[in-house]
Every structure is written in C-alpha cells, then in structure tokens.
Image (cartoon, rainbow, N blue to C red):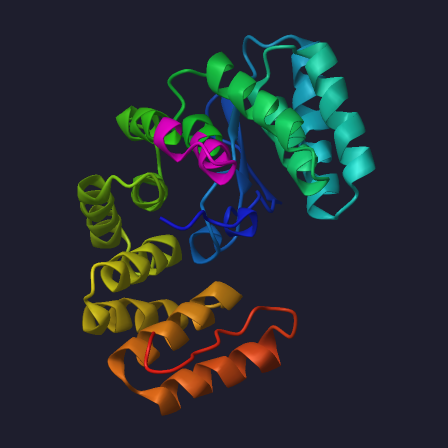
Amino acid sequence: MRRLEMRRFEILSFCVLLVFAASACSRLTFVKPNAKRRGFEQVAPTYSVDGSRRKATSIGANERLMLAQQRLAAGDLERAETEAQAVLRADPRSADAHTLLAVIDQRQGRQAAAGAHYARAAELAPGNGAHANNYGAWLCATGRAAESLTWFDRALADARYATPGGALANAGSCALQAGQLARAGRDLRRALEIDPENAVALMAMAESELAAGRAFEARAFIERRLALVPIEARALQLASQIERRLGDTAAAERYRARLRGEFPGAIVPEFGGNGP
C-alpha cells in the first residue's frame, strides 16, 4: 500500500481544561479539539494529582506541566520545552511531560527524539491507552506500520481509555498500510460503529474500497469524509481519482479545481487516456 504521508499523523494541538474533582484527588486533562477530524489521532494525556498525598514539589511539577501545555498551545515551543524539561527534573517519571516533549520535537522535525519520548511515556504508563495510542501513531507515521498495531492493541486493552474509536481508526489505517487487509476492514468498521464521523476511518475506508475495485463504495466513504471539516488535500485527490474510476470526468474535474483553489501547492491528479 502507498506509504502514508507524515502530515496525516496529526500532532497534539492542546488547549487546557482543568477539572477539579470534589474529592481530594484532582485531574488535569489536556483536550485536543476536533482531533478525530484531522489525521491520525494522538490523544492528549490525563494527569492526576492526589492532593492528600502528593508532595509540594509534585504539585509544582503539575503546575509547570500545565504552563508547558499552555505555551505549546500558544505556539511558544521554546518556552514549552523549557517548562516540560523542568517537570522532568522534578518528576523524572512523568509520562505526560515526555508526551509534551514528543509533540514539541515532532513540530520541530526531530522525529527520532519524538519517538524516544513517546516510547518512554508508554513505558512509564504501561496500562495507559492514550500513551500507547500515541506511540503507535508515531511508529506508523515513520514507516513501522506493522509494529504499530501491537500498541493500538494495548490502547484498546485499557478499559478506562475514553476514545477507543480513535485507536481503532488508527489501527485500521495502519493495518491497511501494512497490507493486513482483513484487520484493516475489521478495525475501520468498528471505528465507524463507534464514531460514524471519524475522518481517519472514513478516509482509510475510501482508499481500501478503491484499491479493492469497489469504486461506488469508495465514493460513499469519501463523500462522508468531505462532509467534515477541515478538508485535507489528499481527500480531494482521492475523490477525483474515485470519480475518474467511475467515469464521471466532470465530477473528477470539479474536485481537481477545488484542489487547485484550496491547496495551491498540492499535487493535482493527472489523468491520461482512459485509465484512472
């Protein structure tokens, strides 16, 4: 299967939501808005603080973690990295700090460093589905699709994992890339049962159906994907290819025109002769 482009693996894009429980234990949750609409899903971490037992230094680390996350959301990568590194000095076993540093490294093009942080976060929190999903997404994005599937399985094994549809969509898309077509179809359909508007699953299903020669089915999935926002260039490229395969050259050209207008730097499919 065609290797997925790195930009389809969406990096964490944070905003902050601080939720204080009524009990002594407080939870800080980093929320990624509209994550399922954009590329492979990497789920924001949850950081729990037990106010009745944690030391003051740990509370301070939690506050710095929140500050690092705020700086990341504002695009201040240098300050975000400084604060996240300070968290690790105070709490070397902070999986969430490693996740933040992984995101910062990815945004700066340091893929190997990002992978090391994602792996360390998953190691420090072996039962945490979010960290397993993040590491799996990084593995798949860097050409290790078959290896990534084990990590999505670990994410799905976490009964407390709040977004199994995202891990299933990632697993299905990466199984498709790895040539495991039976698993891809199974996981993608399960993802869409949980979330019929999962952009990752819809895109992968359209690609899978087209590759299998079922262009009408592919059209149905890509139309559902195009009904969501934001639209990526690849969705319009695929829609044009599907319409060409179906023989509707006018529809194919409409998608190509949209691609030129909305993504001036993107590759516009060129159709020669009677081929797709």
- How many numbered marks does the figure carry? 0
Q: Residue at x 58, y 80 (%)?
A: 260
Choose top left, top right, bottom left or bottom right for residue 11. Answer: top right
The image quadrant where one finds the C terminus is bottom left
Q: Nearer the viewer, residue 98 or 115?
A: 115
Q: Nearer the viewer, residue 48 or 228?
A: 228
Residue 253 visible in the picture = yes
Residue 215 % position (x, y)? 23, 71
Residue 79 % position (x, y)? 82, 35
Q: Residue at x 69, y 15 (%)?
A: 88
Residue 230 visible in the picture = no
Residue 121 % position (x, y)? 53, 20
Q: Is residue 14 above or below residue 23?
A: below
Residue 222 falls within the magenta-colored stretch: no
Residue 153 % position (x, y)? 29, 28
Which residues, given as a range, are shown in magenta?
A: 136-147
In the picture as drawn, the residue positioned furthest to the front comes out as 273
